[in-house]
Each structure stands twice: as C-alpha cells, then as structure tokens.
C-alpha cells in the first residue's frame, strides 16, 4: 500500500532540489508496479478499501500520472518555464497525485474528503505555474469554486454519517460497511446527505450551474494541468459518486434515477451549446469532458456498469492525450484551428492526433463507440422494468440530439485542422512521441476481449 503513495512523495521531496526531468519521469513510472500488484490482491481495513472497482480506476489514473511525468521532459522547452516554475509544478503535482491516490483507495469517507482537499489546494498552485494575470485570476476562481464543491461534499458526508451512526457506530464512515448494510440505514437523512455530496461532486466536475469555470481554468493553466484534471482528479470524484450511488440504489433507486437524469441531461443541454460556440482547442476539450462525465453518470445509475467503466477508461485516456497534444498543435498559433494538423515533418503525429480527435466523439473503433452502444441499451433495458419506457425513449432522443451537436462541432474542428498554412511548422520532441504511443497502446488495450471480460467482472 505504501509503495503506491511513495512515488508522489518522492516527486514532492525532489522538487526542492535541482530537477532532473528524466529521473522524475522514472519515479512517476514506479507507481505501476504496486498498482498492478493490488489489482490481484484486494483487501479491506478501517482506512483503505481495495476492490476491482477502484483498482481499475487507480490503474487508469496512474497511467495518466506516468504520462504527465513524461511530459515534464519537454515542458521547459515547450512552455519556456523557469527553473522555479518547474519546481513549483513538480512540488504540487506530487501533493495532488498523493491526495488523489488517497481518495481512490480510501475506505473512510473522511479520508476520501481529505484526499480531495489535498488535490484541490495543490491544483490552485499548479494553475499559477504560468505566472500571468489571467492564470492568477483563474486560480482564485478555482479556489472559490473548489471550496464550494468540497464544502458541499463534506456537509453531505456528515449527514450520511449521521444517518448510519445508530446502526453501524463508528463504522458509519466506511464505504464498505455502508454498501453492505445499506438497507438498515436511515434512508431519509442519507438521501439528503447524498444529494448534497453528489451536487458538490458534480460541481467539481464542471456540471451545472458552474459549467464555464473548468474551461477557463484549463485554458489559463499549462497543458499538463488540463491532463491531470481530466484523467486523474475526475477519477477520484467519479469513484466517490460510484460508491455513494451503490448505497442510494439500495435505499431508493427511483430517487437516484430521477435526480441524476434531470441533473445530467440539463448539464448536457447547457454544455452542448457552449461547445458549439467554442473557439479554441482547450475549451472544446474541457467542455466535452463534462459531456462524457454526464454520460458515465447516466450509464452507471442505469445499471450499465460495463458501459460506464469502459467509457470512463476511454475518457481518462483520450482527454489527457488531447490536452497534451494541444502543446504540439498550438505552436506559434494559439487559439486557432486552421492548419493545426499541418506543418509536421513526420506524418505519424497528425495521424495519431486525428485518431484521438475522431475517437473522442465515439467514431468506431473507439472504445467510446462500444460504451455508448452498451450504455444506451442499459438505459432502455432499465426503463422496461420501471414503467417509464416512453419517457426513457424521449430522454435518449434528447441526449443523442445534444451529442450530435457536439459531434458536428468536433468534425468541423477536424476539417479546419486539415487546412494547409505556410507558417504552421511544428516541432515534436521524442518524449511527446512516446506519450502519444502510450495513449494509443492503452486505448487499443481497452478494446481487447480480455479487457472487456475484466471490466464486465468488476461489478459482478
């Protein structure tokens, strides 16, 4: 267990000395060994709860963490950062990664919250790595929004703890005890706490009513920070939603369906039109990340666990890959789409980025193509047993309509990116080629029959 938390701690300590970028990348890669070990050795105690669900999520987020460590090799040249700025990034990257790993592995709701608080506070300083008035303003904005979200989560945890305390005693803080004894809990008080906590989680993922803060922050920060938001931080938040919704399913499934569907569809409605009006890469990717998180939440509460987890894995790999690709695409040409895929000496780079752009909108053979088919099927199947089949058909139609709008925007961006322009010459570093190769290999691995079988068995 300690070996999973060790690489972030080492990165934090080394950030106070002269930075060796290659050694930092090596340290980040060390996390893969203990992560693979615990995937085959689950356990539960008062503080940590390791099962197939969070070990899968930990594996995906660890791959992203490793890749962000690799991105540090080219980051000084790419972003023209000072030595102090690089040290600041690694320092708070270590704290951030440590907090997220604690949240993912925690059995105790209080410990889960502490991990999220670590991640929230450290992210404020990572946003300010690029020292500009815009970045400083957005860091303060994130601190305010993050404080609102994390406070809601804490208040919800207190109420959920109070609902189970008479039955479970001090074990009322444990995810495992709550899941296994859900039917004995005071349902009314738990549901109030659940609604408040999940609202905080949704806000922290950019859901309504705070849709724009996420794209503003990821635009103001350096590209690796956007990758960490979409591939690592959201992993911890969505796991908390998965755990709590399992309990709510046993208490009142109808209330869970109603709340999540109304919240998610309204968020998707707002985000689709914001995406349609998007005028640069980062905002496009940030807002589409919110779209994918709404789909994951909808698939999960509909009983489509395989679809939700496959979609989660694909999103957590696609989106950081696209954020890190923006560093390549935007050389000398910030905020512009036209000519983004031209100007490369090696044609393999625009081909890879093109595949990522098209894959994230669920074109086959993207993993998202399969996850959405299974997910919408689960939504239809669940409605057959709950007497609202026509309502579900209408909901699916609305969702597909909004997704089509997003699909249109991405295709338009892709077409504009193909335009040739003379001044679009781009430099690609070896570490960036390795990064894109890791993402492509990981995404291909998600499509293997063995991976499908593993994901299907997570919630069985």
Image (cartoon, helix red, strand yellow):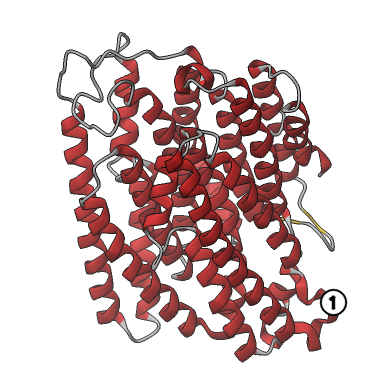
From the image, tell me which residue sits under label 1.
170
Looking at the picture, tell me which residue is in the foreground, 118 or 405. Answer: 118
Identify the residue at image location x=34%, y=50%. 288
Looking at the picture, tell me which residue is in the foreground, 456 or 144. Answer: 144
Question: Which x, y percent locates residue 168?
Answer: 81, 81
Q: Quadrant of the C terminus?
A: bottom right
Looking at the picture, tell me which residue is in the foreground, 247 or 150. Answer: 150
In the picture, measured across the screen, residue 170 lies left or right of residue 12, that is right
Q: Is residue 411 above or below residue 54?
A: above
In the picture, measured across the screen, residue 335 lies left or right of residue 259, that is left
Q: Is residue 196 above or below residue 17?
A: below
Identify the residue at image location x=32%, y=25%. 329
Identify the residue at image location x=42%, y=39%. 318
Question: Which x, y percent locates residue 103?
Answer: 68, 55
Question: Which x, y percent locates residue 242?
Answer: 57, 64
Q: Is residue 357 above or below residue 98?
A: above
Q: Residue furthest front?
A: 133
Q: In which quarter of the view is residue 360 placed?
A: top left
Q: In which quarter of the view is residue 53 placed?
A: bottom right
């Amino acid at each position: 267990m300690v070996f999973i938390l060790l690489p972030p701690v080492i990165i934090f300590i080394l950030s106070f000395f002269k930075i060796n970028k290659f050694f930092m990348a090596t340290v980040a890669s060390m996390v893969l060994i203990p992560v693979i070990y615990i995937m085959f050795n689950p356990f539960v105690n008062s503080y940590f709860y390791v099962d197939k669900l969070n070990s899968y999520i930990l594996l995906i987020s660890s791959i992203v963490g490793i890749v962000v460590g690799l991105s540090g090799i080219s980051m000084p040249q790419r972003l023209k950062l000072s030595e102090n700025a690089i040290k600041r990034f690694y320092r708070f990257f270590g704290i951030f990664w440590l907090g997220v790993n604690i949240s993912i592995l925690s059995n105790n709701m209080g410990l889960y919250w502490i991990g999220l608080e670590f991640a929230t506070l450290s992210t404020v300083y990572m946003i300010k790595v690029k020292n500009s008035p815009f970045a400083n303003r957005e860091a303060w904005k994130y601190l305010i929004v993050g404080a609102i979200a994390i406070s809601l989560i804490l208040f919800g945890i207190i109420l959920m703890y109070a609902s189970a305390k008479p039955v479970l005693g001090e074990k009322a803080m444990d995810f495992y005890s709550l899941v296994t004894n859900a039917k004995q809990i005071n349902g009314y008080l738990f549901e109030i706490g659940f609604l408040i906590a999940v609202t905080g989680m949704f806000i922290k993922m950019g859901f309504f009513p705070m849709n724009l803060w996420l794209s503003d922050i990821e635009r103001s920060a350096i590209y690796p920070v956007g990758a960490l938001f979409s591939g690592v931080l959201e992993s911890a938040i969505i796991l908390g939603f998965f755990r709590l919704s399992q309990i709510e399913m046993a208490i009142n499934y109808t209330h869970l369906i109603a709340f999540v569907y109304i919240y998610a569809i309204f968020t998707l409605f707002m985000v689709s039109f914001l995406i349609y009006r998007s005028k640069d890469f980062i905002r496009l990717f940030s807002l589409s990340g919110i779209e994918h998180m709404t789909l994951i939440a909808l698939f999960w509460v509909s009983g489509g666990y395989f679809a939700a987890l496959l979609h989660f894995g694909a999103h957590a790999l696609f989106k950081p890959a696209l954020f890190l690709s923006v560093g390549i695409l935007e050389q000398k040409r910030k905020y512009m789409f036209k000519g983004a895929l031209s100007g490369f000496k090696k044609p393999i780079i625009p081909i890879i980025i093109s595949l990522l752009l098209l894959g994230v909108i669920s074109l086959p053979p993207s993993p998202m193509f399969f996850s959405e088919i299974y997910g919408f099927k689960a939504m239809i199947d669940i409605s057959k047993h709950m007497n609202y089949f026509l309502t579900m058909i209408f909901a699916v139609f609305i969702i597909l309509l909004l997704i089509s709008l997003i699909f249109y925007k991405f295709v338009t961006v892709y077409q504009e990116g193909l335009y040739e322009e003379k001044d679009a010459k781009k430099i690609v570093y070896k570490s960036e080629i390795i990064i894109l190769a890791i993402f492509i290999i990981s995404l291909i691995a998600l499509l293997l029959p063995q991976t499908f079988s593993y994901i299907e068995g997570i919630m069985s």
